[in-house]
Amino acid sequence: MAKAKRNTGCPIAYSLDVIGDKWSLIIIRDMLMRGKDTYGEFLAAEEGIATNILSDRLRHLCAEGIIEKRRDPDNKKRILYSLTEKGLDLAPLILDMVVWSYHHDANTRASRAMVERIENDRAGLLKELRQKGRARASQPRRS
């Protein structure tokens, strides 16, 4: 995904350069909403990402400061990924995409309960997602 960035000053162009592909957004979704933090967990997502694309997207997201990686202190062979503050700042966008999809995709698996939570307690949900994301980033995962 070595796409050249265009320095146009356009906020939409910048956003798309950084996170504007399906796989990057799915990785961010999995980290933010499903607590995934290892290569194997991302690879096992139902969308079926290829290994070369996953490696490329993880590298890109790290380079852009959206995620960071560290060695698992309990298993030095395993790398743990976590969202940075910059990555956690994408939470409102991800929630908006869930709501939009719920209203426009006849096949969505977004639950009514989740959409109602987003619509009725957005601030509380965003706070919870940030707290969980920060906790995952500061503590090793126990398998």
Image (tube, rainbow, N blue to C red):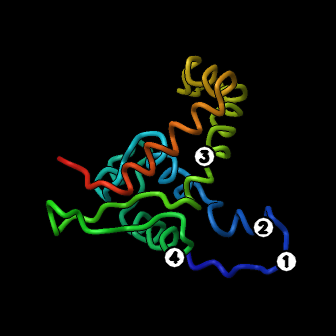
Label pair 4/2, CB-CB below 8 angstroms: no
The image's mark for residue 8 is 1
Nearer to us: label 1 or label 3:
3
Image marks 3 and 4: residues in contact by CB distance under 8 Å: no
> Residue 138 location in percent, x, y?
35, 57
Residue at 21% over, 64% down? 78
Name the amino acid type tagged 3.
Answer: Ala
Q: CA distance from mark 4 to mark 2?
A: 18 Å
Say which amino acid is labelled 2: Ala
* Mark 1 or mark 4: whose residue is earlier in sequence: 1
How many residues crowd mark 4 within 10 Å: few (<14), some (14–19), many (20+)?
few
Which residue, given by chain and number where applicable, does mark 2 sit on? 13
Above-or-below relation of 117 to 32: above
Q: Looking at the picture, does residue 133 appear above or below residue 87?
A: above
**Amino acid type of the residue tagged 1 in the rendering:** Thr
Identify the disc placed on residue 91.
3
Q: For numbered disc 2, what is the local secondary structure?
A: helix
